[in-house]
Image (cartoon, rainbow, N blue to C red):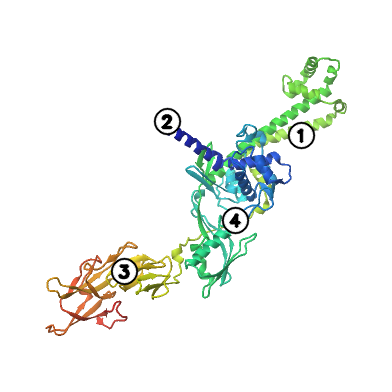
Amino acid sequence: MAYADELYKKNFLEYASYVIRERAIPDIEDGLKPVQRRIMHTLFTIDDGKYVKVANVVGEAMKYHPHGDSSIYDALVNLANAEIFIDKQGNYGNFLTGDSAAAPRYIECRLKPFAKKVLYSPEITEYVDSYDGKHKEPVVFPAKIPVAIIQGTQGIAVTMSTNILPHNLFEVLEAEKKALKGKPFELYPDFPGGGILDVSDYNDGTGKVTVRAKINDEDPKKVIIEELPYGVTTEKMIQSIENANKNGQLRIAQINDYTADKAAIEISWQRNTYSKDMIDVLYATTDCEIKISVNPLVIKDGLPHVVPISEQVKYHAEHLMDVLKRELSFQRGEEEEKLRARTLERIFIEERVYKKIESVKTAEGVRSAIEKGMAPFLEEVAITSLTEDDIERLLKIPIRRISLFDIEKNKKEIEEINRKIKEIDYNLSHIRDYAISTLDDIEASADQSLRERKSVISSFESLSAKEVAVRNLDLRYDKETGYIGTALKSGEVLLKVSTFDKVFYMKNNGEYRVMNVCDKEYIGTEGLLYFNYGEKDIISKEIFTLIYTEKSEDKGKSICYIKRFQISSFTVGKLYSTMKNPKAKIRKLSLYPSAMITLKFKKGCGYRQLEEVRHFADFRVQKSANGQGLMLTAKEIEKINIREMKRNITTEDSEPDLFEE
């Protein structure tokens, strides 16, 4: 059992590590996932400047990627739609409508020159065997810019995920230049579909952003959604609008979708509904406003790390200098090799060393003659002896070239080589300035149509659906059936509500409850004593005064009680009762904070005084709604009148009692 547990743990860890590093998470150096890197490597390998069928690219990429053609095809379409490295031709789908791309046999692609300028440098790229050992593939490309930040990326691995939002290419290049200069910078996402962006919680790519659609509300009777939030398609948007309308949150007459190259969803309003009143409702109740959580997880030094956006830019600034050093060192080596070859060639011809091998009959003798003939002049090349490659190169010089050898031309070539070496040495000693000029060159060669920012950065407060909900639903109570709800067609209309409201009711038997507005729910046929919105700040401010009667246990007489209380706490949906005795009968309910009670007693009971006056102020407000009331009178009651007290003057009620006998 222990062996099985250890084997399970080992296999799971290996699988998790593989998924994290080889499937889902991009590498910080080139910003690509393995499948994307293999696609780019394939395109570099077969590139001839002409369009290639995507099906052919997928087939070639399968030499390096062991996970099937569909994953390669999907990744290639996403890369092409980023419009940074791949030039596409054909139907690549529409991110606005959510339409998928055509089959790989119908669409074509080719590399943009920008891709080679930024990623391709095979001389300094490390290659390893592919999964089957038959081919070589790059470990990472020596990228000169932070690709993951520019095109954005998403991925889900075992126990972790990455979500980096796309940024404007030119803004990232400027930020990288500022990082090289040691200047501060800020970077915020820029979405291909535009939209309005609140980055107050972006937190350098580790927090979240709020994205809103751009809505044209110039027409008071209709609006047009012109830009969608990132990741929201027209189909998803329309579905969210229809759901809000169905729930009574919107008052829509018609929706039309005219989306083509740009989003255009037209919403027409019902009568007596206007755009200015519905904009906030759209943002609060539909996908016109969404929140996106971000997590810049990348592979760094072989392990997953959360690297904030600015740190990735700074990393690439240093990485760019390292890449350029390696490229310049390689170029210098090539130029030195050219200088060596041209100088040896000049000596070989100018000093007529080739004449010394004319009479030699063996290969060994030829090599020996060349070594002896060249030996006195090797100081010019700063070497002590010739290599086999040097000798082979000299032997391959054709007779025609020897006879037509131009000393001046050779001299100019050597001068040009020395100039290049001097320039390379200067760039190596001023690598930071050279890196900045390289970024300037990259910026000049990039697609200038990507320069303009598409998303507008703004600041706005997110609205909840409850805050902007329109109370346009009739909440009815049918005493005959005992049902309450917005879907009822019969019964009394109690309030105008929205689907986000809570309501408070107290029944004639003293039971009360706070409930969510619903289509239909049974609450009983006892009838309602009191009804109102169920917000705590409304209910807790009310002082309820209940006058009720109970039968005395010893004499069987009815005793009249008064109970004054506030409801300061409650649980939504839970049923409470104000009456300890279920046989008690409520006679009056009043919400007056101060009032005068006139009690009229029954005649013929031997009472000398048939009327008595009491005041609410005589009775304290209790802390509990279900406590026992205070005795108001033990006499038989015929009628109870309540009058509000205003400035110590008793007046008739300004409105009828909430409950009549």
What kind of element bears circle 1? helix
Question: Image quadrant for the N terminus?
Answer: top left
Q: Which mark is residue 3?
A: 2
Q: CA distance from mark 3 to mark 4?
A: 51 Å
Residue 32 image offset from top left, x and y in percent: 59, 42
Residue 255 image offset from top left, x and y in percent: 57, 67
Residue 269 image offset from top left, x and y in percent: 54, 71
Residue beneath the point at 12% across and 74% down: 555
Query: Which amino acid type corresponds to the residue marked 3 in the rendered image?
Result: Lys
Question: Which mark lies nearer to you, 4 or 2?
Answer: 2
Q: Which residue is mark 4?
A: 98
First in residue order: circle 4 vs circle 1: 4
Eyeballing the image, is 201 above or below 622?
above
Mark 2, other Cα within 10 Å: few <14 / some 14–19 / many ≥20? few
For residue 550, say whether it is visible.
yes
Q: Nearer the viewer, residue 214 or 350?
A: 214
Q: Which residue is mark 3?
A: 541
What kind of element bears circle 3? loop
Look at the numbered discs 3 and 1 and tell me whether their residues touch, using CB distance below 8 Å: no
First in residue order: circle 3 vs circle 4: 4
Residue 624 image offset from top left, x and y in percent: 24, 65
Question: Image quadrant for the C terminus?
Answer: bottom left
Q: Which residue is mark 1?
A: 416
Look at the numbered discs 1 and 2 and tell me whether their residues touch, using CB distance below 8 Å: no
